[in-house]
Image (cartoon, helix red, strand yellow):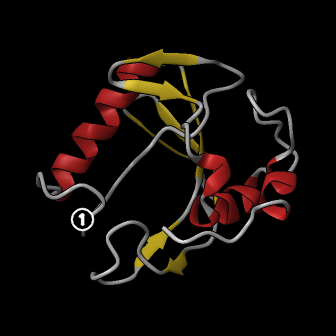
Amino acid sequence: MRSCRKNGIRVRRLSSMIETEPWGLREQPKFINMAVEIETEAPPHELLRLLKDIEAAIGRQPSVRMGPRVIDLDILMYDDLHLKTPDLEIPHPRIKYRDFVLRPLAEIAPDTIHPVHKKRIRELLDNLKPSTP
């Protein structure tokens, strides 16, 4: 993959795109999910602002929670950082429960250790119990 750098973010790895059933609000079209590993010097809250700016530039509009959206960018992990503020929690608190997050993440970072659960991403995926959203 060719390196891409913009806004202080360098894309290092991309997973494949995975089509999944909606989670939460079931009566909506399927979603396309993927994971991206980046390199940045932006601190977490600045990175969040950059991601929200990207969402807005692509056309994301406020809508119903878990409803259809053009794009949804989340910070899943940031090195081994633990952070909990009113507007940002790292690592993302629901990673270990969501197949649609773990599958693409395991594709690009299977041996990465989750900083809270202390398990490899691949282990979290392998141990995921089926659930109803």
Q: Residue at x 58, y 66 (%)?
A: 100
Q: How crowded is the residue under tag 1: few (<14 C-alpha within 10 Å), some, or many (20+)? A: some
Whether residue 123 is situated above or below residue 120 in the rendered picture: below
**Front-lying residue, 31 or 131:** 131
The image quadrant that residue 88 belongs to is top left
Q: Residue at x 86, y 40 (%)?
A: 119
The image quadrant that residue 104 belongs to is bottom right
* Res 43 seen here: no
Image quarter of the N terminus: bottom right
Across and down, in percent, residue 117 comes to 78, 34
**Front-lying residue, 36 or 94:** 94
**Front-lying residue, 18 or 83:** 83
Q: Which residue is mark 1?
A: 69
Across and down, in percent, residue 127 comes to 84, 59
**Circle 1 SS class:** loop
Instruction: From the viewer's perspective, tell me whether residue 91 is left or right of residue 32.
Output: right
Q: Residue at x 80, y 52 (%)?
A: 124
Across and down, in percent, residue 19 comes to 51, 81
Instruction: From the viewer's perspective, tell me whether residue 126 is left or right of residue 32.
Output: right
Across and down, in percent, residue 63 comes to 13, 57
Instruction: From the viewer's perspective, tell me whether residue 9 is left or right of residue 52.
Output: right
Instruction: From the viewer's perspective, tell me whether residue 125 is left or right of residue 26.
Output: right
Q: Residue at x 63, y 54 (%)?
A: 97
* Res 71 seen here: yes
Residue type at mark 1: give it.
Arg
